[in-house]
Amino acid sequence: MILAAMRATSIKLAASGVAALLGLALASAGCAGVTAATTPVEVYRSLGSKQCEGGGKTAAQLRAQLEAAKVRVRVTTCGRDGRMHPAMCGAGDGKIAIFSIDAQDFARARAAGFGALTDLPGARREACDLDELTPPPDETRR
């Protein structure tokens, strides 16, 4: 009886080992299409808005600039640059737009004036206002 229980345990252990190896092989195969070129990287650009005044560009406008430079944007979000800004009207407010792009497009994004988010270690994400995500109306449609 003890021998039968030991055999059953050995069979279960062997089966779980085969299942684990099979799972590892399947997981590795699933990652076969991921390359360094398709690994996402994050870039940013200042919205150019000022304290007490607002203004500047929207995240949607900056996204359009990336797309015009043939950069595929995966995700758009907003944030703050994490730098100290003097509290006075007309000074920059630190608002940025953050874009997740493919690593292969980084040089084009840099050439279009966007920086690597890793250059802003204090940056933090925050929700975009609706008007930051909505492009302004096209004046030619009026």
Image: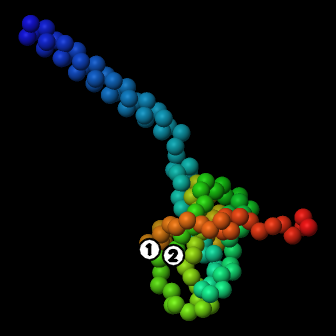
Question: Which amino acid, by three-letter code, is at mark 1?
Answer: Gly
Query: Picture quarter containing residue 139?
Result: bottom right
Side (left or right) of 133 relative to 5: right
Q: What element carries label 1?
A: loop
Which quadrant is home to the C terminus? bottom right
Mark 1 Cα within 10 Å, few/some/many (few <14, many 20+)? few
Out of 37 and 81, give the one closest to the viewer. 81
Where does residue 63 sit, x and y in percent of width and height? Answer: 68, 63
Q: Name the residue under label 1.
A: 122
N-terminal of the pair, mark 2 or mark 1, is: 2
Mark 2 Cα within 10 Å, few/some/many (few <14, many 20+)? many
Where does residue 128 sit, x and y in percent of width and height? Answer: 59, 66
Side (left or right) of 123 relative to 90: left
Instruction: Say if 26 sits above or below 99 in the image.
Output: above
Where does residue 106 sit, x and y in percent of width and height? Answer: 59, 61
Residue drawn at (31%, 22%) of the image: 18
